[in-house]
């Protein structure tokens, strides 16, 4: 009987971890799974495909020299994708990601299975004719927005789900099938250091992280953001980390198909750039590696899934309702049950000063929301995810009728 890791034509099944985004915020959601695949399932042929040097460097840092030395890395060709006209188009849409796929179809076609954190990659199969491919989705966050109900999830062959919350939602919307998904927790937690929180200010004043989303309808940045920064500028006894979602300053124009909304992102006013109590990061690797969610005492935001990364250690949180949301009882705003929700920035500083005393009132809701979002039982998430992927590959991909007939 042929080795179960070989296809019916005698060649080895080829699995690829694909990193195809202009910014690195998705890397930490799959790199820990990659690491455990290489350690625990070395008999599976795994390659790493990257479209930027930054993504590759982050993956390499997570693997270490020994694992990296025996891993096949492929740098995707981005010559055409990075030309001026396409780079300009990328300021309003994911043009580069699509272009990279088109530019590398010959390379991509050599693989059988792709492990990805996003849905653009599905275009290889649905738009570009590579219909032999299978796709495994890891997700890249575990928030509450309607994006967790995207119909494209249904097109994945196998899905890694972080916890009961998304498992229920995916099932309610017919997005996952029994046997074709696994609840594996949040591998990103295995990728970052915990404890020894970074110190960003030369004082012991409270540190608030302001982390608005980029969505032009849901984000507080467009209508409240400057007022938030002005409030902290006027209160030097409070420290502020302004680290918005990394995509805000990647694009000049943001669109929402869901809400039929388009907004232009304004430049950050220069008056905030040199204030000793305001630390600004518009898109460095530290904005996505949990440096700031670990460093802050209080979280301030709207709908970003980073709230749940912050709640890995339970602390006070505050939300800004800038779009007049009727949020109570709405599962798309589950995170807003974990702290006070403000509709006016004029109440912000008072709420920040009282956040620690009020935290006990919200702790039960924080525990409930976090535990519903992440299943962190039964070992490391990245180990569970790697084992689930390997088991599915052996059971469903390498046991298809034509493969069995060849054995």
Image: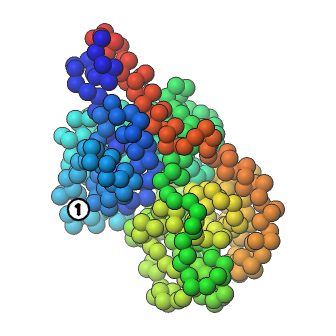
Q: Using the image, determine if residue 187 lies above or below residue 43.
A: below
Q: Residue at x 34, y 20 (%)?
A: 4
- Asked whether, in this view, residue 228 is left or right of residue 103, the answer is right
The residue that mark 1 highlights is 82
Q: Percent x, y for residue 140?
A: 48, 50
Q: Nearer the viewer, residue 5 or 398?
A: 5
Q: Percent x, y for residue 229?
A: 58, 82
Q: Using the image, determine if residue 254 lies above or below residue 279.
A: above
Q: Nearer the viewer, residue 178 or 322?
A: 178
Q: Using the image, determine if residue 287 lies above or below residue 1.
A: below
- Asked whether, in this view, residue 315 is left or right of residue 101, the answer is right
Q: Percent x, y for residue 313?
A: 65, 59
Q: Residue at x 51, y 66 (%)?
A: 291
Give the quadrant of the C terminus: top left
Is any atom of residue 39 visible in this view? yes
Crowdedness near tag 1: few (<14), some (14–19) or many (≥20) residues, C-alpha within 10 Å: some
Q: Using the image, determine if residue 335 lies above or below residue 279.
A: above
Q: Residue at x 67, y 51 (%)?
A: 370
Q: Percent x, y for residue 206?
A: 66, 78
Tally of numbered discs: 1
- Asked whether, in this view, residue 362 is left or right of residue 386, the answer is right
Q: Residue at x 51, y 71 (%)?
A: 243
């Amino acid at each position: 009987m042929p080795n179960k890791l070989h296809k019916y034509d005698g060649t080895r099944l080829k699995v690829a971890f694909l990193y195809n985004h202009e910014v690195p915020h998705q890397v930490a959601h799959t790199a820990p799974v990659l690491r455990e695949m290489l350690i625990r399932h070395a008999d599976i042929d795994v390659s790493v495909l990257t479209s930027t040097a930054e993504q590759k460097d982050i993956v390499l840092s997570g693997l270490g020299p020994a694992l990296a030395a025996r891993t096949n890395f492929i740098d995707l060709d981005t010559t055409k994708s990075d030309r001026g006209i396409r780079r300009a188009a990328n300021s309003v849409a994911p043009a580069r990601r699509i272009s990279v796929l088109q530019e590398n179809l010959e390379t991509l076609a050599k693989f059988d299975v792709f492990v990805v954190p996003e849905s653009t990659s599905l275009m290889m199969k649905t738009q570009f004719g590579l219909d032999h491919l299978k796709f495994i989705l890891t997700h890249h966050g575990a928030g509450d927005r309607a994006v967790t109900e995207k119909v494209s999830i249904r097109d994945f062959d196998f899905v890694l789900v972080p916890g009961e919350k998304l498992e229920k939602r995916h099932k309610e919307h017919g997005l996952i099938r029994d046997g074709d998904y696994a609840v594996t927790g949040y591998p990103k937690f295995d990728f970052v250091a915990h404890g020894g929180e970074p110190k960003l200010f030369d004082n012991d004043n409270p540190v608030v992280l302001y982390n608005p989303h980029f969505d032009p309808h849901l984000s507080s940045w467009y209508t409240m953001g400057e007022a938030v920064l002005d409030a902290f500028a006027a209160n030097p006894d409070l420290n502020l980390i302004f680290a918005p979602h990394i995509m805000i300053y990647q694009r000049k124009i943001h669109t929402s198909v869901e809400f039929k909304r388009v907004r232009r992102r304004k430049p950050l006013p220069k008056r905030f750039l040199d204030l000793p109590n305001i630390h600004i990061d518009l898109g460095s690797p530290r904005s996505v590696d949990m440096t700031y969610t670990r460093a802050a005492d209080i979280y301030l935001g709207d709908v970003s899934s980073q709230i749940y990364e912050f709640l890995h250690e339970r602390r006070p949180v505050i939300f800004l309702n800038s779009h007049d949301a009727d949020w109570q009882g709405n599962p798309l705003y589950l995170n807003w049950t974990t702290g006070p929700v403000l509709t006016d920035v004029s109440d912000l500083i008072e709420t920040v000063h009282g956040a620690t005393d009020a935290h006990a009132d919200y702790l039960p809701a924080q525990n409930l929301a976090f535990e519903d979002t992440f299943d962190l039982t039964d070992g490391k998430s990245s180990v569970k995810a790697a084992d689930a992927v390997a088991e599915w590959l052996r059971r469903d991909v390498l046991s298809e009728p034509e493969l069995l007939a060849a054995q």
